[in-house]
Image: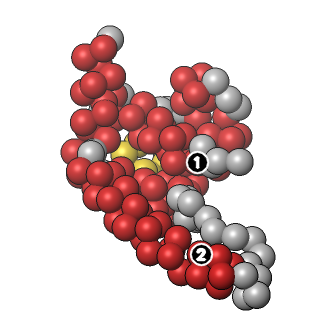
Amino acid sequence: MQSTRFALGVHVLVVLAIHDGEAVSSEKIAGSINTNPSFVRQVLSRLREAELVTTQLGTGGGALLARAASRIRLDEVHEAMESRPTVATHHSEPSAECVVGRHIVPLLCEVLDRADLAHRAELRRVTIADLARQVLKRG
């Protein structure tokens, strides 16, 4: 099963970017994502640990971007939200008795390492501000 944590983290950050400096409650963010506020608070916790958001308690409280949306890159969000590699290899060690089993993991790791570098390079190119502009443009 694929993880949606990255997409949810990006969603939260774009909501905050569009509200530009206004603290946004977890209830309001949850309405945008179509989930419950307690789940949003878990996402916000990860983003806060990565220093991408700040939170304010009390009346008028909520979440804010920790820095300008133009200075938050998607690779930072990915790093904050995902603990697993994008693609995993075998759960158990392949058979050393088989020619494929002996060589497939190192070969596959070489390909996956190159793919991961390309993936991270693309995420590094895009900021939360880029996505917020596109969302507003599509209105």
Cα distance, mark 2 to mark 1?
29 Å
**Which residue is pictured at 77% across the width and 76% down the height?**
92
Instruction: Work out whether residue 98 or residue 139 is closer to the camera in this orientation and state it.
Output: 98
> Which circle marks residue 5 in the picture?
1
| Rendered image quadrant of residue 38 | top right
Q: Vertically, is 90 above or below 99?
A: above
Q: Position of residue 114 (x, y in %)?
A: 37, 67
Residue depth check, mark 2 versus mark 1: number of the one nearer the observer: 2
Could you tell whether 134 is left or right of 29 in the image?
A: left
User: Mark 2 or mark 1: which comes first in sequence?
Assistant: 1
Q: Position of residue 85 (x, y in %)?
A: 55, 65
Per the image, the residue denoted by label 2 is 104
**Which residue is pictured at 44% across the width and 68% down the height?**
111
Instruction: Work out whether residue 82 or residue 22 is closer to the camera in this orientation and state it.
Output: 82
| Contact check, label 2 and label 1, Cβ < 8 Å | no
- Quick one: SS at disc 1? helix
Of all residues, the one furthest to the front in this rendering is: 99
> Which circle marks residue 17 in the picture?
none
For disc 2, the neighbor class at 10 Å (few under 14, some 14 to 19, many from 20) is: some
Q: Vertically, is 131 above or below 57?
A: above
